[in-house]
Each structure stands twice: as structure tokens, then as C-alpha cells.
Image: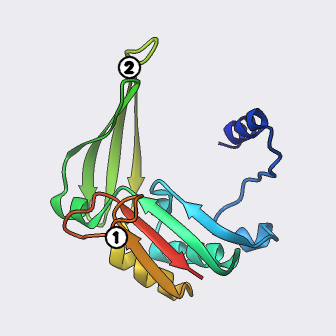
Amino acid sequence: MLVKARANLAQAGLDVPLQQVDYRELPEHVEQRFDAVLCLGNSILHMPNEAEVLRAFRSMRGVLREGGLLVLAQGTSDRQWREKPRFMLATDTPEFSRLFVIDYLGDGACYNVLDVFHGEGGGRLEAWSTEYAHILLRDDQERLLCDAGFRRVDFYGSYNFSPYDRESSQRLITVARR
């Protein structure tokens, strides 16, 4: 990811320092304070347990300025967890499709992913899996973020700021204010 980020920055003519750091240890490695920290694409779900999630949230809070925002985004919503669909078409464009085949495992899930590349030289397939020990839903996130010291937590069901609805939202976007 850092190689790709460096290439993108160079192409844009930007000079931004990059470093690889465990997000549970940000204050030990980063001196600056930020207006926002983004944690996107289910990455927080890779934490092995709630104690490590809480450690990560405290770390992220530790590098935010007063009033700064932590933005979390994940595709697993309360609705999906309740309905537990086995198959989900996550992306479908003329160039690329992604299909999830999901195994629900107690509090966690294994996402088996099939990527299909349709574009130039199409017909290529890639398959891989990722396992989440514990799926964090709205109430879990709110509790842990409050325990980490965030003073306000808001939830959205899409990137256009529509309110999060446990019954219908297909995405869980969380904005926590320091």
C-alpha cells in the first residue's frame, strides 16, 4: 500500500510523508495531531478481540486534535448480520466484479472473495478469504468508542449522510468526535 501511495503522490506532484505504523500504537510513532483519522473497509474488524479494538480506538483518539473526527466505515451492517446472506455481489462494473461467499461463524465471519476482471485482457479470476473473529455492529462500536473517550458518536447508512437504520442500512459509517 505504501508503494502505491508513494506512486500516486509522485504522479500528483505531492510530497507527503508516509510511514507504516500499527494503528494501536499511533501516539508512540506520530507526533502530529490531526483533524481526522479514517479507518475504512472493515479494517477494525481484523482486531482479534474487543480489548484490542479499544486499544486501537484510544490510539486513534490520541492523535486527534480536540474536536477531531474518527471515521469508521464497514460493509457489515446490523441488517446483514440479522439476515446472514450467503452470497453478496459487492461490486459490479464493466471492468470488475466482486462476489462474497460468507460463512457466519458465531460472533465472526469468513468472507470468501471472488474477484472477476472483465476489462481489457478480462477473464482473469482471483479468489481469497479473510476472517473476522468478531463483527462489531452499531452498539458495539458506540460502547467501545465511548469507553475510548470519544464524546459524541454519530451513525450513517451511506456516504451521503443518510441516518443509519438497523433494519435497512447496508453500510455502517461511524463518525466519532474527540
The amino acid at mark 1 is: Leu
Q: Is residue 102 above or below residue 12?
A: below
- Is 18 or 20 nearer to us in this picture? 18
Q: Secondary structure at mark 2?
A: loop
Q: Which residue is mark 2?
A: 118
Q: Secondary structure at mark 1?
A: loop
Percent position of residue 87, x then y: 21, 43
Q: Is residue 38 above or below residue 124?
A: below
Estimate how packed mark 2 is, as few (under 14), some (14 to 19) or many (20 or more) residues with alpha carbons within 10 Å: some
Percent position of residue 162, x then y: 34, 65
Q: Quadrant of residue 100?
A: top left
The residue mark sitting in front, 2 or 1, is 2
In the rendered structure, which disc, 2 or 1, sits on the residue that comes first in sequence? 2
Q: Is residue 149 above or below residue 136?
A: below
Q: Which residue is mark 1?
A: 137
Q: Residue at x 40, y 65 (%)?
A: 161
Q: Residue at x 40, y 59 (%)?
A: 160
Mark 2 and mark 1: Cα distance apart in space: 33 Å
Are circles 2 and 1 on residues that touch, CB within 8 Å? no
Question: Which quarter of the figure is the C terminus placed in?
Answer: bottom right
Q: Quadrant of residue 62?
A: bottom right
Instruction: Report the disc number at residue 61.
Output: none
Estimate how packed mark 1 is, as few (under 14), some (14 to 19) or many (20 or more) residues with alpha carbons within 10 Å: some
